[in-house]
Image (cartoon, helix red, strand yellow):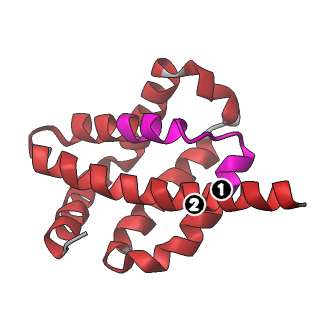
Amino acid sequence: MDAARRQRIKDSFNALAPQGEALIELFYKNLFNDHPEVRSMFPDDMSTQKMHLLTSLALIVKNIDNFASLEEPLMKMGARHQGYGTQPEHYPVVAETLLGAMAELAGPIWTPQLQEDWTAAITAIAGVMMKGAESRGQLRTAA
């Protein structure tokens, strides 16, 4: 991921940050409306989950210039998600829903370039998380 892409991601996230809670609310509302089959994978009380997602997004953006430093925490996150029942086909659903929520709240600042930038970032994040989930699955199989 080149420096210009990373900067656009940081700038757009900073523009969305004041609407962070609204972003997360919209994301989960759309996720559960469009994909009700995933609702059971989440707790009834979503307040902590929502905070974790917003914090994770902020941490990823803050450290995007050193993506390698995110690999271990993202792999651990992927392993935890695998334990909740997350399957590889859930990652594109989450990505599409998150991108849609971001685009809706960003309004006119959301461009095709930002869509491409965030898609690349989320794809990279999901790839590392799936690697962590696979590692957990292999460890379980071997045990």
Residue 13, given in percent of the width and then of the height, sits at 27, 58
**Quadrant (top left/top right/bottom left/bottom right) for the C terminus:** bottom right
Residue at 61% across, 21% down? 37
Q: Which residue is mark 1?
A: 134
Query: What's the magenta bit mostly, secondary-structure-wise?
Result: helix
- The one nearer the camera, 50 or 91, is 91
Q: Is residue 16 above or below residue 85?
A: below
Residue 119, given in percent of the width and then of the height, sits at 29, 49
Give the number of callouts: 2
Describe the element under mark 1 as helix, strand or loop: helix
Where on the picture, by quarter, is residue 76? bottom right
Q: Is residue 65 visible in the rendered structure shown here? A: yes
Q: Are marks 2 and 1 in contact (CB under 8 Å)?
A: yes
Describe the element under mark 2 as helix, strand or loop: helix
Highlighted magenta segment, given as a residue range? 79-96
**Quadrant (top left/top right/bottom left/bottom right) for the N terminus:** bottom left
Residue 138, given in percent of the width and then of the height, sits at 75, 58
Q: Residue furthest front?
A: 142
Q: Is residue 142 left or right of residue 62?
A: right
Q: Is residue 18 above or below residue 39?
A: below
Mark 1 residue crowding within 10 angstroms, few (<14) / some (14–19) / many (20+):
some
Residue at 65% across, 55% down? 133
- The one nearer the camera, 97 or 104, is 97
Residue 84, given in percent of the width and then of the height, sits at 72, 43
Q: Is residue 111 visible in the rendered structure shown here? A: no
Q: Which mark is residue 131?
A: 2
Residue at 15% across, 38% down? 107
